[in-house]
Image (cartoon, rainbow, N blue to C red):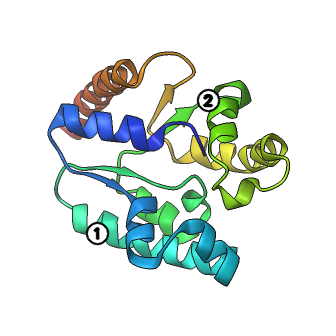
Amino acid sequence: MAVGKSAIGHQLAQQLGVPFVDTDAVIVGNHGSIADIFAGRGEHAFREIEARTVASVVEDAAGSAAVISLGGGAVLDSGTQQLLGRCTVVYLECDADTVAGRIARNSGRPLLAGDAMARWTALFATRKPVYERLANLVLDVRHGSVAELGRRLEAALRVFAAAKQEVEN
């Protein structure tokens, strides 16, 4: 949450010349704002919408190259975790200092209502082990511009793909 998934994902997709899909943007386009979904229907309803959206996006991209950005909590769904087993998953690693300014500028995050940094810290503590378990690659996003991070991620993905190809042959 607030680590730069959308910006870095868009940058990477542009570099690779492949489609970029932000599942949060798809949800907003189909169902309205995430804050409104939380307020009107609750987190459980949002998570159901999110899981269906992720499944649809991943299925639509099957067999082709695409960059898909998931909301920070999407990986908590067991079905989503299974789907991601067929994908190359990148964990954008950060810390509270990295996201503090972004969170302060964006008050539209329903899970961060109240003491945003305390909530972020608690959510991150719960999610981090899942991110680490699912990730094929980890990119430290604490330093560097979006363009620099995109280049570093592209290079890491190329090394990962080559190593995977060697194992398969």
Residue 94 falls left or right of residue 91: right
Residue 49 falls left or right of residue 132: left
Q: Residue at x 17, y 59 (%)?
A: 63
Q: Is residue 139 above or below residue 102?
A: above
Q: Quadrant of residue 38?
A: bottom right
Q: Position of residue 33 (x, y in %)?
A: 52, 69
Q: Residue at x 38, y 70 (%)?
A: 29
Q: Which residue is mark 2?
A: 94
Q: Amino acid at mark 1?
A: Glu
Q: Position of residue 20 (x, y in %)?
A: 27, 50
| Local SS, label 2 | loop
Task: Name the residue nearer the viewer: 10 or 162.
Answer: 10
Q: Position of residue 16 (x, y in %)?
A: 18, 35
Q: Residue at x 80, y 49 (%)?
A: 119
Residue 158 falls left or right of residue 77: left
Task: Name the residue nearer the viewer: 116 or 150.
Answer: 116
Residue 45 in view (yes/no): yes
- How far apart, in angstroms, are the residues tagged by discs 1 and 2? 29 Å
Q: Amino acid at mark 2?
A: Cys
Task: Name the residue nearer the viewer: 117 or 106.
Answer: 106
> Do tag 1 and tag 2 residues touch (Cβ < 8 Å)?
no
Q: Which residue is mark 1?
A: 59
Q: Position of residue 136 (x, y in %)?
A: 44, 39
